[in-house]
Amino acid sequence: MNRIAIIVGLVLLAAAGFGWYQYSYLPDQEAAEAARMAEEDAARAAAEAREAAEAAREEAAAAAEETEDAAAQAASDAAAAADAATAAASDAAAAAAAATEEAARTAGEAASSAADAAVEAAKEAAAAATLAARNAADAAGELLPEDLLRVETFDRVRVDAMIDSSDLDPSTKERLKNTIDAAQSTPELLGPALETVRTSLGFAPSAAEAD
């Protein structure tokens, strides 16, 4: 009886140990295997991630290099375009300055020629009018000393003779002759100059001056 009880006890102990093994040791093994497999999967995923990151870095470096080359080329093209624009602007400014200078020179020459021609024409007209008036007065026999002091009948030789033969002092005579010299080529100035001589010589003012 005792032996049977011992055997039953041993059987129970064996069953309990097997149960403990089933419920304790086997789950630990399965958990360890699952952890090992998870670790391997994580290592494989990390390696794949590193490979992907390296590939992305290489692609980014290549793209950056291409972008840098393109930017450098664009900057070079922009600098060349700026140089060309500057040169064109400089050429245009030089051409405009030359054209302006040429136009001013041409206009100045034309104006000077026109002024010279006008002065010459005025001198010729005044001389012709004076000669005509003088001839008319001489023909009529009415040319008096004071008539020589009018613009229309002015005779420089006779006027100088009148001044030299007057009672004026030498400095006044010289001043009157210089006044006539300065005004002789311009009828507008000759009239007042002759009036000064008339007054200095004691003649009455001309009709035009009296008016």
Image (cartoon, rainbow, N blue to C red):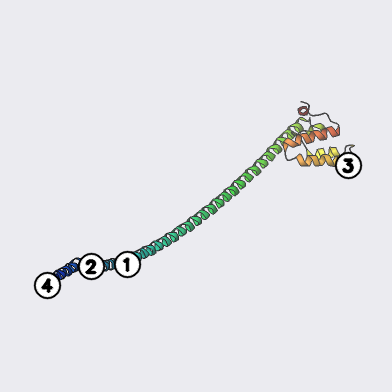
Query: Is label 1 in contact with label 3 (beta carbons under 8 Å)?
Result: no
The three-letter amino acid code for the residue at tag 2 is Asp
Tell me what residue is drawn at x 23 percent, y 67 percent.
28
Q: Which residue is mark 3?
A: 170
Mark 3 vs mark 2, foreground winner is: 2
Q: Nearer the viewer, residue 65 or 5?
A: 5
Q: Give the image location of residue 18, x and y in percent.
A: 16, 69
The image shows residue 119, relative to residue 13, as above or below, that is above
The crowd level at tag 1 (other Cα within 10 Å; few <14, some 14-19, many 20+) is: few
Q: Earlier in the sequence, mark 3 or mark 4?
A: 4
Q: Residue furthest top?
A: 211
Q: Earlier in the sequence, mark 3 or mark 2?
A: 2
Q: Which residue is mark 1?
A: 50
Please give left or right for residue 21 compared with residue 175 in the image. Answer: left
In the rendered view of the protein, which quadrant contains the C terminus?
A: top right
The image shows residue 59, relative to residue 193, as above or below, that is below
Mark 1 vs mark 4, foreground winner is: 4
Query: Is label 1 in contact with label 4 (beta carbons under 8 Å)?
Result: no
Q: Earlier in the sequence, mark 1 or mark 3?
A: 1
Visible residue check, residue 65: yes
Q: Earlier in the sequence, mark 2 or mark 1?
A: 2
Q: Give the image location of residue 10, x and y in percent.
A: 14, 72
The three-letter amino acid code for the residue at tag 3 is Pro
Q: Give the image location of residue 50, x and y in percent.
A: 32, 67
The crowd level at tag 4 (other Cα within 10 Å; few <14, some 14-19, many 20+) is: few
Quarter of the image where one finds residue 126: top right
In the rendered view of the protein, which quadrant contains the N terminus?
A: bottom left
Q: Which residue is mark 2?
A: 28
